[in-house]
Image: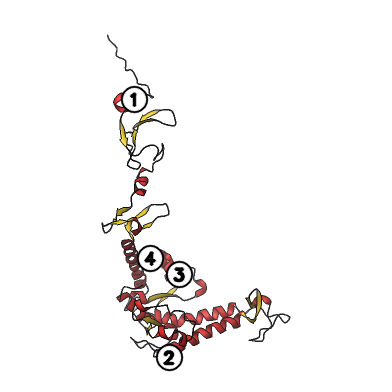
Amino acid sequence: MIFLYAVGRRRDTLPNHLATTSKVCPNCDRSFLVNQVGPDGVRRNHRKRTHCFDCVPFGDFTARGLSRRSRTEKPCSRCGEVKPLSDFYKRSRGDHKSMCKSCHDKDGTSTRNDYKAEAVAYKGGKCRDCGYNRYLGALEFHHLDPSKKDFSIGALGYSFETAKPALDKCSLVCGNCHREEHPRLSDLAALKADQGVLDPGGPKCSRCGDCKTPESFTVKDGKPGSWCRACFRTYQRDNRIGIKREIIEYKGGSCSMCSYSRSHAALELHHKDITQKDFGLGEVRKRLALVKEEVDKCILVCVNCHREVHHAFGLR
């Protein structure tokens, strides 16, 4: 009887046809042998490797990432067009997203609109006070009790189920009605926070005549001012309201599209030609005489009509 014994090959040697096989690295264009001795002292055949061991060392599995980083353009997974990498948003890990910026923004806008449409339908689909329901973007959520507000509805991402507990604390109103309600609440809260603490031995406010603690006064150039914070905030608010009232009266006093005129807080200026816009008039702090040239480029509209116009022309 003849016994055949299989003779095992040493692990540090390979057949000649494998030992001489080489490839060209697509990153550095240099040839390299497929079989190499690893850090553990064992020679192996890396026949599936595409990059040399200088570009992608042993144990490094970033060959795909390396090939991606070496290119200057890529196809968009949504529209299919090949665009430069500058047209793609960059991830925190260093690579670029699969969709181009245009498709990515359209996808995000569509998702947000679907999320808001579901939330608006849940709250009745129209303004609680005036019944407005023409444009989804002009409908907002107003917290019935600001002290129970944990976060804004817009910060909840795109999950309706996550936003549902917060929606139960809100009512659905249009932009005009929301502006009518918020100035009253915010002014009262700000004035209450800035009242300060009365102190008979403290400095005296030159505006209201009350003696308060030094912390209750404004600070200018490192020195306490002559007005307390409550008086200073009241002055700033009244000044802004006076400037806006002057501009609104100059532009007719009501919305040029729907004739709304109940609250000055809900009236805004819209540039008729965006290419001629030199600066925004959302927070005007200068009198009409100084901004009259810019005001003449605008029409007076309410919040609801302003958003409808921007939506119709594809503006933000």
SS type, badge 2: helix
Of the numbered discs 1 and 3, the one sitting upstream in the chain is: 1
Disc 1 marks which amino acid? Leu
Q: Residues within 10 Å of mark 3 (few under 14, many from 20)?
A: few
SS type, badge 4: helix
Farthest residue to the right: give it: 201
Residue at mark 2: 249
**Which of the labelled discs sits on residue 94, or is there none?**
none
Residue at mark 1: 14
> What color scheme is it?
secondary structure
> Residue at left 30%, top 30%?
21
**Quarter of the image holding residue 259?**
bottom left
Q: Nearer the viewer, residue 59 or 8?
A: 59
**Which of the labelled discs sits on residue 160, or is there none?**
4
Of the numbered discs 2 and 3, the one sitting upstream in the chain is: 3
Disc 4 marks which amino acid? Phe
Q: Nearer the viewer, residue 8 or 310?
A: 310
SS type, badge 1: loop
